[in-house]
Amino acid sequence: MYKDRKVVVVMPAYQAGQTLRKTYDEVMEQGIVDLVIVVDDASSDNTLAVAESLPRTVAFRHQRNRGYGGNQKSCYRLALDHGGDIVIMVHPDYQYTPKLIPVMASMIGSGVYECVLGSRILGGYALKGGMPVWKYVSNRFLTLVENFVTGAKLSEYHTGYRAFSRGLLEKIPFEVNSDDFVFDNQMLLQVIWAGYTVAEVSCPTSYFPEASSINFTRSVTYGFGCLYNALRFRL
C-alpha cells in the first residue's frame, strides 16, 4: 500500500523463466507492493510454473501468443479487476531495476501525476547499460520527432518501465491499440492527447543475454509505426 492505495505490479512475461524470480524478489523488497500479476504469453519455458510458485502473485497464461501489446492489455485489465490504484509495469527480464517502484508510486499516490516513466536516457544510463548504439540513435530520433509533434518534452517515449493511476487506465482506450510492440507508443500518445502531464525518473538499465529485446527488423517496423502514430496525432 501507498497512502491506503493498492499498489499492483504487472509483468508481461515471455520466456522469462530464468529472470522472473530475481525480478519478483526485488519488487517485493521495496515493501509497498500488494500484488504482482504475471501474464505469460504462451511461453515454451517454465515461466508459468515460476509465476505460480510466487506468493501474492496472480499468474495468468495466454493459450496462444498475443504479442507484447496483447499481453499488456491482459495485465492492465487484471490489475483493474484486482483493485489496483497504482499500477506499475516492470519487465520480468530484469532490464529495469524494481528499486524505483517506491519513487514512481509516490509520484502517482501524491496526486501530482497520473503517469510516470522510468527513462533510460535521463542520466545517460542507456549506453552505459549496454543499449546498442543503433537503438540509442533511433530512440533519440523518434523522441525528437514525437516531442515536436506532441509539444511534450520527454527524454524518451520508448521505455517499458511505466506507472499509471487507476483513473488514467480507466479513461485511456488502450484496448483499441495494437497487440504488437507499438502498443507502448500508442498508449503514451493517448495519455498526452488526453491532456495528462507525464513525469519521468532516471532509470539505470541493463542489457544482457537473458533480457528480452526486439531484433533489428522488428525495431525498424516499430520505428515506422511510431512515426505513423505521430503523424496521426498531428492530424
Image (tube, rainbow, N blue to C red):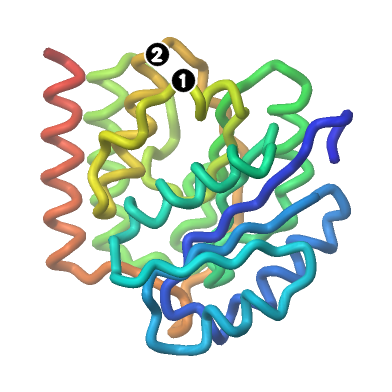
Q: Which mark is residue 212?
A: none
Instruction: Specify few, some or many for label 2: CA neighbours under 10 Å numbering under 14, 14-19, or 20 or more.
Output: few
Residue depicted at 50% across the width and 25% down the height: 170
Q: Which mark is residue 171?
A: 1
Local SS, label 1? helix
Residue depicted at 51% across the width and 29% down the height: 169
The spot of residue 105 in percent (x, y) is 73, 37
Q: Is residue 75 above or below residue 40?
A: above
Instruction: Look at the numbered discs 1 and 2 and tell me whether their residues touch, using CB distance below 8 Å.
Output: yes
Q: Is residue 144 above or below residue 41?
A: above
Label 1 to label 2: alpha-carbon separation: 9 Å
Local SS, label 2? loop
Q: Residue flagged by tag 1: what amino acid is it?
A: Lys
**Reading the chain from its start, which is encountered first: label 1 or label 2?**
1
Disc 2 marks which residue?
194
The spot of residue 60 in percent (x, y) is 52, 65
- In this view of the protein, can residue 202 be seen by the observer? no
Label tally: 2
Camera-side residue: 139 or 220?
Answer: 220
Q: Residue flagged by tag 2: what amino acid is it?
A: Ala
Camera-side residue: 206 or 127?
Answer: 206
Instruction: Specify few, some or many for label 1: CA neighbours under 10 Å numbering under 14, 14-19, or 20 or more.
Output: few
The spot of residue 94 in percent (x, y) is 58, 70
Camera-side residue: 218 or 164?
Answer: 164
Camera-near label (1 vs 2) is: 1
